[in-house]
Amino acid sequence: MKIAICWTGYSGYMAACWQALCACRGLQVRIYSPETRYHYAPEILEKLPIQIFTAEELSAGKLVRAVVQQGPDLIFVSGFSYKPFRQLLRVRELKTAKVVMCMDAAWRGQLRQFAARVVYAPYVRRTSAVVVAGERGRQYARYLGYAANRIFGSTYGCDYARFSPAMAVRRKAPEGWPRSFVYIGRYAKIKGLDTLLEAYRRYRRARQDAWPLHCFGNGDLRDQLLQTEGVVDHGFLQPQELQEELSRHGAMILPSKHEPWGVALAEAAASGLPIICSDACCSGLDIVRQLYDGLVFAAGDAGQLTRAMLYLHDHRDSLPEFGARAQVYAQAYSAENWARRWEWIIENVMESE
């Protein structure tokens, strides 16, 4: 069976998921993607049947022609907002192919989401199913008009096999469980970095032996980050470098004000890290249980985040147990389990009327 995956960019975790899907018997998978703004090492795409398009090639319709040439039985598209993917749904040569829409958008009750029900109605009718990234995504899909039996999970997975060995390294550390927090993501307000920096300053005032905060990423708030005592900026890391770095830290913080899902959270949990996340992180609904493997705080509330940091600081002896529990939840989102779910989706869609 020929499968076309049209995705708005590539990443280390999606490359791992696609590799697992390509290994499934009976599937001939091809991936089509525009160039990404992130500078991933070329080796993450090695052995993947992927074709990458420049902006000029997309404008010239080369992606659409490439998919037509493949002649897929089933097409996955990551959303309706990307023009080349909408064009695919109208191409005469692909009218017999079934289409599945994949989205990470979560229901937030916004005006534009209410409007989307009307704007995207023709595309919803053209697609056979939708793949969502969590319960809030399922709610949004129902609002868009998808019946319950046309909604599947999950959009994302993580490279569990890459990250899970970090737990053993952390447990064997001569100094015991690492005394440090880690943040992974863009340095931007939407990611809650302003909340994190304010909470971290309060935390440092409350504890003389405060842990450092190590940050991995880039963005507009980098200068604020550098001006905060105790914060260390490491910049953007390749996926293969991140696993080793996570083994050196004691807890992950994801303070986003909006986070459609949050693969970084799943990767940190896969590495055996306790998690502090905001209630805006949809992956937190799937992975984090309050005071069992981490803590959840109200997005934008620096006071609650400070108290969460203090709790982990003061209960360091419990962190290995928290991390082990987080790993169990994260394993459900391994690339191999993601591929099994997508096999199930493909089977259901192709056998449905």
Image (tube, helix red, strand yellow):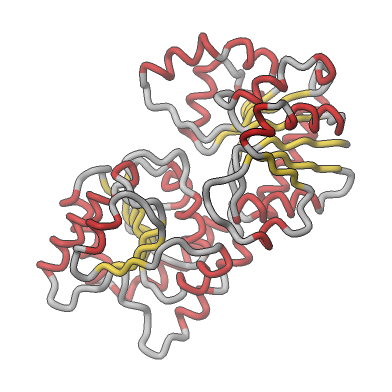
Which quadrant would residue 33 be assigned to in this image?
A: top right
Can residue 203 be seen by looking at this rendering?
Answer: yes
- Residue 340 x, y percent position in the rendering: 73, 47
Which quadrant would residue 122 be assigned to in this image?
A: top right
Q: Is 110 positioned to the left or the right of 287 in the image? A: left
Can residue 332 be seen by looking at this rendering?
Answer: no
Q: Quadrant of the N terminus?
A: top right
Q: Is residue 84 above or below residue 165?
A: above
Q: Is residue 127 above or below residue 197?
A: above
Between 316 and 51, which is closer to the camera in this rendering?
51
Q: Is residue 20 above or below residue 309?
A: above
- Residue 331 x, y percent position in the rendering: 58, 58
- Residue 36 x, y percent position in the rendering: 57, 45
Between 97 and 10, which is closer to the camera in this rendering?
10
- Residue 334 x, y percent position in the rendering: 62, 55
Which quadrant would residue 8 be assigned to in this image?
A: top right
Between 248 and 142, which is closer to the camera in this rendering?
248
Residue at 63% x, 65% y is 161
Residue at 78% x, 23% y is 98
Question: Which residue sits furthest left?
Answer: 205
Q: State how many labels appear.
A: 0
Residue at 66% x, 53% y is 15
Residue at 70% x, 15% y is 126
Q: Is 224 positioned to the left or the right of 25 in the image? A: left
Q: Quadrant of the C terminus?
A: top right
